[in-house]
Image (cartoon, rainbow, N blue to C red):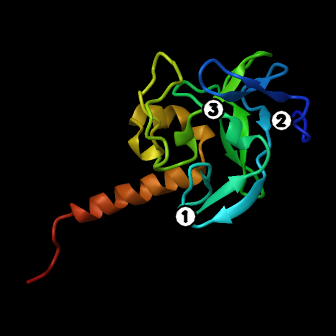
Amino acid sequence: MIKDFQMTSTVETRATDGRGDGIFALGPFEAGDTLYVGVLDEIRIKNHSHASQIGKTSFGFHSGLSSIFNHSCDPNCGIRINETGGHDIVAIRHISAGDEAVYDYAMRNYQIQHFPCPCSCGAANCRNSITGWKDLPQNRKDAYASFVAPYLIEIDIEQAAAIRLAHAPDRHIS
């Protein structure tokens, strides 16, 4: 359920402790509620530090507050692709008013190339670096499955098929 397409009354930007600005909930959200509707501003072919992967091989910039949502290895939000191809930010569990809304950047990008610094999310299960989908353990992928960009799961399926094919016994007839 989308609470407000304007999204001005549901979240706001605030300073965080040591991680710059972040997005904070102004009211409660339940799992499945949309906190923010992603609007693509520009589509590029190559990755960029503020770009989001929007397809198997394409990247784009979202307008508005999208780039201010911080990463966490223990997210309370996830991604849903909307009808424009943009990333909506959706609650994956209860979020109280005043909580920072965070998601795992691996939920949108197969590979992270632009975050060389250690992760500073502070979560108990922190991976110590911001990694992409390809570097997540399977149990984390399973936990995120309903809240990730579908092209990530498609890439995993294609990669697994390629590996099986590469390791298949040679079936040449002599």
Residue 124 screen position, x and y as percent: 47, 15
From mark 3 to mark 2, how far is it between C-alphas? 23 Å
Q: Is residue 4 left or right of residue 41?
A: right
From mark 1 to mark 2, how far is it between C-alphas? 33 Å
Q: Quadrant of residue 116?
A: top left
Residue 123 screen position, x and y as percent: 51, 18
Taking the spot 56% from the left edge, 28% from the top edge, the residue there is: 72
- Name the residue that disc number 2 marks: 1
Q: Residues within 10 Å of mark 3 (few under 14, many from 20)?
A: many
- Depth order, front residue of 58/94: 58
Q: Secondary structure at mark 1?
A: loop
- Name the residue that disc number 3 marks: 70
- Depth order, front residue of 1/124: 124
Taking the spot 17% from the left edge, 73% from the top edge, the residue there is: 171
Work out whether mark 3 precedes mark 2 in sequence or the reverse, and give the earlier one.
Answer: 2
Q: Secondary structure at mark 2?
A: loop
Q: Is residue 128 left or right of residue 153?
A: left
Q: Quadrant of residue 96?
A: top right
- Name the residue that disc number 1 marks: 46
Q: Which mark is residue 18?
A: none
Q: Image height check: is 166 above or below 113?
A: below
Residue 32 screen position, x and y as percent: 74, 32
Work out whether mark 1 precedes mark 3 in sequence or the reverse, and give the earlier one.
Answer: 1
